[in-house]
Amino acid sequence: MPKEETKLQRIFQLAKNPVHIRNIATSAHIHHGKTAFTDNLLAASGYMAAKYAGDLDKGMATWQHSDEQERLLTVDAANVSMVHDFGGKEYLINLIDTPGHVDFSGNVTRAMRAVDGTIVLVCASEGIMPQTETVLKQALRERVKPILFINKVDRMIKELKLSPEEMQKRFIKIFEDFNRLIEEIAEPEYKEKWKVSILDGSVAFGSARDNWGMSVPYMKQKGMTFKDIVKIYEMSEEDRNKWTWENAPLYKVILDAVIKHLPDPITAQKYRIPKIWPGDLESEFGKDLMNCNANGKLGFMITRITIDPISGKEISAGRLFSGKLRPGMEVYLNLGKQKQKIQQVLIYNGVRPEVLEEIPAGNVLAVSGISGFAGETITLEPEEPFRELKHIFEPVITKAIEPVRPMDLPKLVEVLKKVAKEDPSIKIQINEETGENLMSGMGELHLEIIENRIKTEKNVDIKTSAPIVVYRETVMKKSPEVMGKSPNKHNLFFFEIAPLEGPVYEAIKKGEIAEGRIKKKDEILWKKLSSLGLSNDEARQYKEVYKSCVFLDKTKGLIQISEVIGLIMDAFEQVVDSGPIVREPCMRLKVSLIDAKLHEDAIHRGPAQVYPAIRDAIKEGMAKATSVLFEPIQTHLIESPIEFMGEVTNLVSSKRGQLLNITQEGARVLIEGKIPVSEMIGWSSDLRSATEGRGVSSLMDQAFEKVPNEVQEKVIRQIRQRKGIKEAV
């Protein structure tokens, strides 16, 4: 029997037993060595030659696009599966290698929904970095358990020349910083339970590039000390490679830790499902999800879509939480509200997808034949869908995009629709009337990569505008009661507009309050709002949470309101999508319907009457509540040689930036600065110029803050001019 077939058969057999499955991700700050690390695991499992693992030319198996090779960074999450022997038993490891660059953090968010555990890589010399904190937030938000791998130990020996004692001190500091983050970020129940430990092996260290790894239990078992680690760098490269594969193979230390410390799907789903699925846990579907029941109702969530470059077909990867998937099954898309048929069911054999006849619950897999979006819940009949995937950061940079040849416009529109599916953190707005297409992303690099792929992989020649910053509209105080009148004068609506309370806004941003229209009895939401200081009455008046804005129905005794409430919320969403000042999205609005006078005949209160009345009233209320523009602000950590400290601080100040903190570490300086995104176009090249190419910056946080009064009018005027809106607000 061919060796490849034997491997696939082993994967298929293990896929039937969830106790022997581990669904995991790798996550890290950029350039902390994840892809070389994943190569190493693949090589050990026989999926690539050991000598190519971590090699920039012949390795990096999960880099599927040429731009990843060129830029030496992971852009797309990549699925791989492998078999590992632990304690005389075989286990199936389904691993997702995720990007480290913050512009591609949407891929990390989506991957975390599919897995139960993550290996967080931290560079031994750089320690915890901003993106380490971001990926940990993304994992803990989805109740994904972390373990820690301290990578690039070779740098401590070869570059920093640390003694074994100094190395141990460095490891302890990283381990303590990591646990401090878990304590700060995790939910109360997991603050202590999920801390990592040097003694039990949930902390390991090594060099993915040099193919070795160790942990304290492993060293005790082998009778090794830190002095042995230093000695391996006194060997020739050939001898070192031989020694590491025989005595300290990275894959064994890491995958043993994965099996020992990260949960199987049956264990994980018991505590993950209540967090990621808002339905009734006592229902039949709820119990099947909680128990990872392969014989129960089908529950599959799409977390990533790729387009096959040859056939143009969509491949939907994701996690099967309950039931079984088979080719030919007719399934229901709960967000798309339609039935579709599965053509193929695929499991990963290394990096290659392989067709199988059936896959049961507990697996990370892919299907073809379905045309949906990341975040879609696939079932057999309509069910409560999984919670929406909440990204850590929002798109803040937009570019207008058009084809070089006007005849390519229909092709570009199709390509943009596919781009939106492949990367849901890219927001696409297609205006087929005006022919204007807008593409919004996390940063300049994000948009640059997508533009390049449209040209090279989708073969559409395009031109783009200069980057445009995405703003937000909101209000500063509570409005008096305002009235909206329908065009036929037969319906009146009375509203109050106010800024949304800070704790409620933060809870929505963190995903603790789910977005969407609220069902009649949502006890979980009411309890959450009460815990944030709202009265019981007000909590029950919540009817919708939409894009960090809320709609409340405070009317009393209006029988006909139930017939128009859907239309009222439609119009509320229209204003949130396009505010009154400059047609930018709104944020942090609390819109309360106080009263209404409705025509008794339904024909006189249709959409054509309700929509304009609601839009006019909310816009008038916003004007009376002092509507203002907010701009995106990013907090960056800038690392540079100490001699460029003056140049870096001047650069931050010249961009309307605010210096938050300056610390010195040896010959380097770390500068924390808060800078408006509108001033950061071309930031990378400006920083390179100021530091002779030796400064780097990483995004720590992002928020929207009020545009300063002295530039508010100017910014409004510029945006109105660009959008062709009449000057008067």
Image: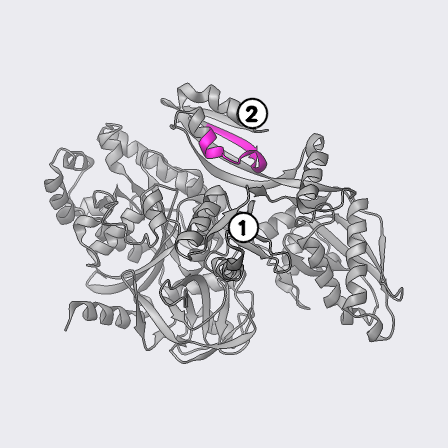
- Determine which residue is flagged by label 1: 401
Label 1 amino acid?
Answer: Ile
Query: Is 576 placed above or below 471 here?
Result: below
Instruction: Please tell me which residue lies in front, 174 or 386.
Output: 386
Q: Is residue 64 left or right of residue 50?
A: right
Confirm whether the magenta stretch covers residue 680: yes
Label 2 amino acid?
Answer: Ser
- Determine which residue is flagged by label 2: 653
Q: Position of residue 634 (x, y in %)?
A: 54, 37
Confirm whether the magenta stretch covers residue 590: no
Secondary structure at badge 2 equals helix
Image quarter where the C terminus lies is top right
Image quarter where the N terminus lies is bottom left
Query: Is 190 placed above or below 232 here?
Result: below
Residue drawn 32% across and 68% down?
347
Q: Position of residue 334 (x, y in %)?
A: 54, 71
Query: Is 493 placed above or below 101 here?
Result: below
Q: CA distance from mark 2 to mark 1?
A: 32 Å
Q: Position of residue 132 (x, y in %)?
A: 41, 42
Q: Earlier in the sequence, mark 2 or mark 1?
A: 1
Span shown in magenta: 671-686
Residue drawn 48% across and 49% down?
186
Residue drawn 55% across and 42% down?
467
Answer with the quarter of the image where residue 319 lies: bottom left
Instruction: Please tell me which residue lies in front, 635 or 172.
Output: 635
Q: Is residue 232 left or right of residue 475?
A: left
Q: Is residue 147 left or right of residue 10?
A: right
